[in-house]
Image (cartoon, rainbow, N blue to C red):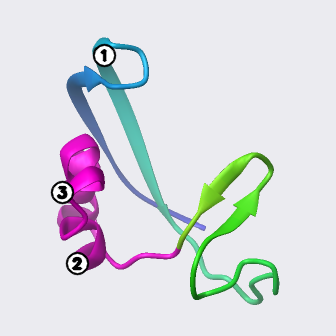
């Protein structure tokens, strides 16, 4: 893993119904093998969390993700 950078963002938290400040740290990882359960197509679960592989463009075009996490997507675009 390699540390790429940080970003700080203050925004409204839909989960907590209040404004919060978030500090993000971005790392770039080289993966040798992805578990078969982490299907490249569709959703998969890690613990109680639903996950899905997406490109930055796919996240930008998803209205819900963009509305909640446009700051995170911008950090990805700026740092990768």
Upstream in the sequence, badge 3 or badge 2? Answer: 2
Residue 61 in the image: above or below residue 40? above
Nearer the camera: disc 3 or disc 2: 2
Q: Position of residue 78 (x, y in %)?
A: 18, 63
Q: CA distance from mark 1 to mark 3?
A: 18 Å
Of 56 and 61, the residue lying toward us: 61
Q: Which residue is mark 1?
A: 20
Q: Position of residue 17 (x, y in %)?
A: 33, 13
Q: CA distance from mark 2 to mark 1?
A: 26 Å
Label 3 crowd bin: few (<14), some (14–19), many (20+), radius 10 Å: some
Q: Secondary structure at mark 3?
A: helix
The image quadrant that residue 32 belongs to is bottom right
State which region is magenta.
53-80
At a point 61% along the width and 71% down the height, the residue shown is: 43
At a point 28% along the width and 62% down the height, the residue shown is: 76
Q: Which residue is mark 3?
A: 74
Q: Secondary structure at mark 2?
A: helix
Label 1 crowd bin: few (<14), some (14–19), many (20+), radius 10 Å: few
Q: Is residue 53 left or right of residue 8?
A: right
The image quadrant that residue 46 belongs to is bottom right
At a point 73% along the width and 61% down the height, the residue shown is: 45
Q: Secondary structure at mark 1?
A: strand
Label number found at residue 57: 2
């Amino acid at each position: 893993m390699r540390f790429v950078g940080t970003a700080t963002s203050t925004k409204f938290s839909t989960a907590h119904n209040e404004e919060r400040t978030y500090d993000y740290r971005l790392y770039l990882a080289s993966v040798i093998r992805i578990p078969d359960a982490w299907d490249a197509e569709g959703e998969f679960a890690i613990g109680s969390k639903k996950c899905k592989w997406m490109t930055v463009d796919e996240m930008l075009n998803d209205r819900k993700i963009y509305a909640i996490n446009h700051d995170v997507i911008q950090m990805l675009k700026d740092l990768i």
